[in-house]
Amino acid sequence: MVIKLIIFICIVWLLIKVVKKIMIPAGDKESFRNFSDKRSRGNIEEMIQDPCCGKYIPANKAIRMNINGKELFFCCMQCADSYKKNECNI
């Protein structure tokens, strides 16, 4: 009786594994795991929008400028210069 129960539990466990493998592709599970790891370590970068061209860039790679007492973030010096001259595309 005990052996039948152990065999039954093993078969159920294998079926669950097979169904999970079919339902969740490996790539999706891996990308979710990578996202969870980055989030728990605080490695997800904040994205900010350039006020001149509208492009989103990581805050740690943006050019920071203080204009009229307001801290602004730009994707490049050309956008910062255009913003100062009021020549932006947006």
Image (cartoon, rainbow, N blue to C red):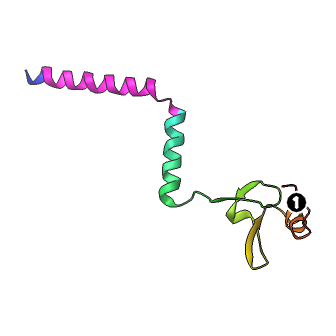
Q: Position of residue 14 (x, y in %)?
A: 31, 24
Q: Position of residue 60 (x, y in %)?
A: 68, 65
Q: Quadrant of the C terminus?
A: bottom right
Is 25 covered by the magenta stretch?
yes
Query: Label 1 neighbourhood size at 10 Å, few (<14), some (14-19), many (20+)?
Result: some
Helix, strand or loop for the magenta stretch, by majority: helix
Q: Is residue 66 above or below residue 56?
A: below
Question: What segment is highlighted magenta in the picture?
Answer: 4-26
The residue that label 1 is drawn on is 88
Using the image as rendered, state which of residue 16 and residue 56 is in the foreground.
56
Q: Is residue 48 above or below residue 4?
A: below
Q: Position of residue 32 (x, y in %)?
A: 50, 42
Q: Is residue 14 above or below residue 34?
A: above
Identify the residue at horizontal 86%, vertical 66% (top origin): 83
Using the image as rendered, state which of residue 3 and residue 24 is in the foreground.
24
Using the image as rendered, state which of residue 3 and residue 49 is in the foreground.
49
Q: Does residue 46 appear to the left or right of 55 in the view shown? A: left
User: Quadrant location of residue 65?
Assistant: bottom right
Q: Does residue 70 appear to the left or right of 7 in the view shown? A: right
Residue furthest bottom as drawn = 69
User: How many numbered marks are there?
Assistant: 1
Identify the residue at horizontal 73%, vertical 75% (top origin): 70
**Amino acid marked by disc 1:** Cys
Q: Position of residue 59 (x, y in %)?
A: 68, 63
